[in-house]
């Protein structure tokens, strides 16, 4: 019996062709083939060059941050303060250079992915042309009965050849259809890559704006210190002690709230589990957890760790979780976000990570996040924003780990001085016990 191409298969093939509205995809993502002159190999080489340059810049930044940490070990004199600010300015300028480099590299990635999309579109168009030709032959054969085909051939062998050719057309149609589906899947993946790269570019541009603003603030701080002290150590030391009581009050407010919850939990607090959470930011630890030696500046106890880096450095979630609080203001932690991590490692008990002093943040209460999601950008908000700030102030991330039991948020006690602000509190752990 003669084998005929089934109607469902023909309809399926025709439906695929009619659904290939590829041109709309191109313009939706702004990919214009005429503008993509560089080859993939050229783009890959340029990206490699940018990565090498970036590594060199980051090495310089790490060097500056190490020098800043060393300078903070010395007495807080005017000369040392100016030296530290100059190092911070140099580090921030290098960070701006690094961010511009990342923007260039991201633009290269966008061009590379766009090239891939254009190539895939061309492959789809080619396969579509092949499929149209095959469908035309299928349609022609489908309109002829087996008897007509048999009578059109001179002998039985030619008839069998015709049957085999017909079967071959169907097989080739199915093969072409499969190729088109694979190409469509590739296209969808590359569209997702392009969307992600463009989102990354937006984040980098925002980071650059923040870092530029941070550089301007650092330069302004330096000029203000010099103007108010007129270069005199005595005047500098007088400025340094002006806000001492206010600083003591803020720190006492935080410590008293934390201590109440810690006392309530007693010996039921969690045991250390190293590697439970990830580092939230690249940088240098400038102050550890506990009694850190800054008692002369009001720090009898430090409930987290401080990680310093140039202004605008991105901050990431230390683990999977849910945002349980955010806050802004000029007191305590400034712009902060708290994320609850249901770790599953403590018989269902959870911890909360706090990210403080950010310039801005991207999350909202109730939002679900994954480890490595962008939380915000390093800043100098809250009780860090002093003209004379010492080792524990200035641009850094304050990172605290709380026990989820007893965690809460309450309005700050000094709104007349700082304006409205909220204070998150709870039983704290050394973050280094879980990193």
Image (cartoon, helix red, strand yellow):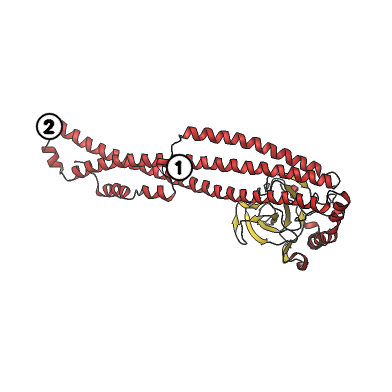
The front one of 5 and 128 is 128
Bin the neighbour count of mark 1 within 10 Å (Cα to Cα): few under 14, some 14-19, many 20 and up. Answer: many
Residue 4 in picture, x, y percent from top left: 22, 43
Numbered disc in front, either 1 or 2: 1
Q: Earlier in the sequence, mark 1 or mark 2?
A: 1
- x and y percent of residue 251 in the render? 81, 59
**Residue linked to disc 2:** 155
Quarter occupied by the N terminus: top left
Residue at point 22%, 38% (across, down): 166
What count of labels does the image hold? Answer: 2
Residue projecting furthest to the bottom: 416
63 or 34, nearer to the observer:
34
Q: Which disc is residue 114 wearing?
A: 1
Q: CA distance from mark 1 to mark 2?
A: 55 Å
| Marks 1,2: beta carbons within 8 A | no
Residue ranking furthest to the right: 234
Residue 162 location, quadrant = top left
Residue at image position (75%, 47%) is 432
Nearest the eye: 242 or 15: 242
């Amino acid at each position: 019996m003669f084998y005929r191409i089934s109607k469902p298969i023909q309809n399926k093939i025709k439906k695929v062709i009619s659904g290939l509205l590829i041109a709309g995809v191109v313009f939706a993502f702004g990919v214009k083939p005429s503008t993509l002159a560089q080859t993939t190999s050229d783009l890959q080489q340029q990206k490699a060059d940018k990565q090498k340059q970036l590594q060199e810049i980051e090495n310089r930044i790490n060097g500056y941050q190490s020098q800043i940490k060393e300078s903070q070990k010395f007495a807080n004199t005017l000369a040392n303060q100016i030296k530290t600010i100059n190092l911070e300015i140099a580090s921030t300028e290098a960070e701006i250079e690094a961010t511009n480099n990342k923007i260039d590299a991201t633009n290269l990635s966008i061009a590379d992915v766009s090239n891939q999309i254009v190539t895939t579109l061309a492959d789809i168009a080619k396969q579509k042309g092949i499929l149209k030709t095959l469908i035309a032959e299928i349609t022609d054969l489908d309109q002829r009965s087996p008897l007509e085909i048999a009578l059109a051939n001179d002998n039985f062998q030619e008839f069998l050849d015709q049957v085999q050719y017909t079967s071959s057309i169907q097989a080739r149609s199915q093969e072409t259809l499969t190729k088109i589906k694979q190409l469509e899947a590739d296209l969808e993946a590359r569209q997702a890559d392009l969307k992600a790269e463009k989102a990354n570019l937006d984040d980098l541009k925002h980071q650059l704006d923040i870092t530029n603003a941070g550089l301007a603030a650092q330069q302004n701080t330096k000029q203000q210190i010099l103007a108010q002290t007129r270069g005199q150590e005595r005047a500098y030391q007088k400025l340094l002690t002006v806000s001492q009581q206010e600083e003591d009050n803020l720190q006492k407010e935080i410590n008293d709230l934390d201590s109440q919850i810690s006392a309530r939990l007693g010996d039921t607090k969690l045991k250390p589990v190293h590697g439970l959470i990830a580092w939230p930011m690249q940088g240098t630890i400038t102050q550890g957890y506990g009694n850190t030696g800054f008692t002369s500046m009001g720090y009898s106890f430090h409930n987290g760790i401080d990680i310093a880096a140039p202004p605008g450095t991105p901050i990431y979630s230390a683990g999977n979780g849910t945002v349980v609080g955010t806050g802004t203001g000029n007191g305590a932690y400034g712009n902060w976000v708290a994320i609850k991590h249901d770790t599953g490692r403590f018989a269902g008990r959870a911890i909360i990570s706090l990210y403080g002093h950010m310039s801005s943040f991207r999350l909202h209460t109730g939002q679900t996040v994954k480890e490595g999601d962008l939380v915000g950008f390093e800043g100098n908000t809250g009780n860090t924003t002093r003209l004379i700030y010492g080792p524990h102030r200035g641009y850094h991330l304050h990172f605290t780990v709380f026990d989820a039991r007893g965690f809460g948020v309450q309005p700050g006690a000094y709104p007349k001085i700082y304006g409205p602000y909220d204070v998150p509190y709870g039983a704290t752990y050394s973050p280094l016990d879980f990193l």
